């Protein structure tokens, strides 16, 4: 009996037709390689995110809070914060595949979206995802950067899924560790190395009233709140669809 993953592989990559390449891919599945890499893409909201050069595979939790961010950007709260509602300036930082920024740009065509990514190999992947999802390309800018190093100016929203796994904890699935990019997963001894720097630096790259949305582990919530308050943010931590504290919204005061 075929597994659900094999059935999905057969349907999505081979249009239901079994061939030698299909059985080769089944062996890759059996060895633990993620289905998304074998197929070559992953769905994300109403986008098809290509995974050329193997960026981090988009997660359902990220999809959940990205949809919430889209609602916030579209919503009336942006007006009360004094942000640019005509063409909000948005940054997808630690962009990876660009899934967050592409979904936002597709949902809000008037938005100006920058994609910041440290791995130069992924810049063409982000560009491909912008084009393939029929996003307004003139409003998008893909930038090779280490955090904010090459990002001048200020944003209304910074949305980020940074590396946040604690390298000392042995709870990451074997297939994730073996196949997905280390640099996109692990955030130092406590998982907060990148997040801490990001919060501090974001104060110089957000408009007053601007929002920083950060994905993180639930046990990191209090540290993020404390660091945010120390740096002039209000902090609101939210649960994902699985009732886990998964992301925080920091608003620059």
Image: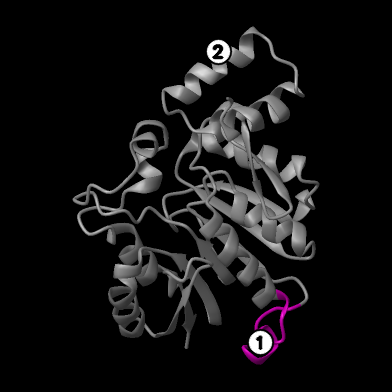
User: Residue at position x 59%, y 48% from top?
Assistant: 98
Which residue is the extreme one toward the front?
1
In front here: 242 or 52?
242
For residue 75, above or below residue 30: below
Highlighted magenta segment, given as a residue range: 74-85
Q: Is residue 107 left or right of residue 4?
A: right
- Toward which corner of the image does residue 210 lie, by quadrant? bottom right
Q: Is residue 79 magenta?
A: yes
Label 2: few (<14), some (14–19) or many (≥20) C-alpha neighbours in 10 Å: few
Question: Badge 1 is on which residue?
Answer: 77
Q: Secondary structure at mark 2?
A: helix
**Quarter of the image where the N terminus is located:** top right
Label 1: few (<14), some (14–19) or many (≥20) C-alpha neighbours in 10 Å: few
Q: Nearer the viewer, mark 1 or mark 2?
A: 2
User: Residue 224 placed where, x, y %?
Assistant: 33, 74
Q: Is residue 249 left or right of residue 173?
A: right
Question: Badge 2 is on which residue?
Answer: 24
For residue 132, above or below residue 111: above
Residue 108 — which label? none
Q: Find out whether the residues at labels 1 and 2 contact each other: C-beta distance under 8 Å.
A: no
State which tag comes first along the sequence, 1 or 2: 2
């Amino acid at each position: 009996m075929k597994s659900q993953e094999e059935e999905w592989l057969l349907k999505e990559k081979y249009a239901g037709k079994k061939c030698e390449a299909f059985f080769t891919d089944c062996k890759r599945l059996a060895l633990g390689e993620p289905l998304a890499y074998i197929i070559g893409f992953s769905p994300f909201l109403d986008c098809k995110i290509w995974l050329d050069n193997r960026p981090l595979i988009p997660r359902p939790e990220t999809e959940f809070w990205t949809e919430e961010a889209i609602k916030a950007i579209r919503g009336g709260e942006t007006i009360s914060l004094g942000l640019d509602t005509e063409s909000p300036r948005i940054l997808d930082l630690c962009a990876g595949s660009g899934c967050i920024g592409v979904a936002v740009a597709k949902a809000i065509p008037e938005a100006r979206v920058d994609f910041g990514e440290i791995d130069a190999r992924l810049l063409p992947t982000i560009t491909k995802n912008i084009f393939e999802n029929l996003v307004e390309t003139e409003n998008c800018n893909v930038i090779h950067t280490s955090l904010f190093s090459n990002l001048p100016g200020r944003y209304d929203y910074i949305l980020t899924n940074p590396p946040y796994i604690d390298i000392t904890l042995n709870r990451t699935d074997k297939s994730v560790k073996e196949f997905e990019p280390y640099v996109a997963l692990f955030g130092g001894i406590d998982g907060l190395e990148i997040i801490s720097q990001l919060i501090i630096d974001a104060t110089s790259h957000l408009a007053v009233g601007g929002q920083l949305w950060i994905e993180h582990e639930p046990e990191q919530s209090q540290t993020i709140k404390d660091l945010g308050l120390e740096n002039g943010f209000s902090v609101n931590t939210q649960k994902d669809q699985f009732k886990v504290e998964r992301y925080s919204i920091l608003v620059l005061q």
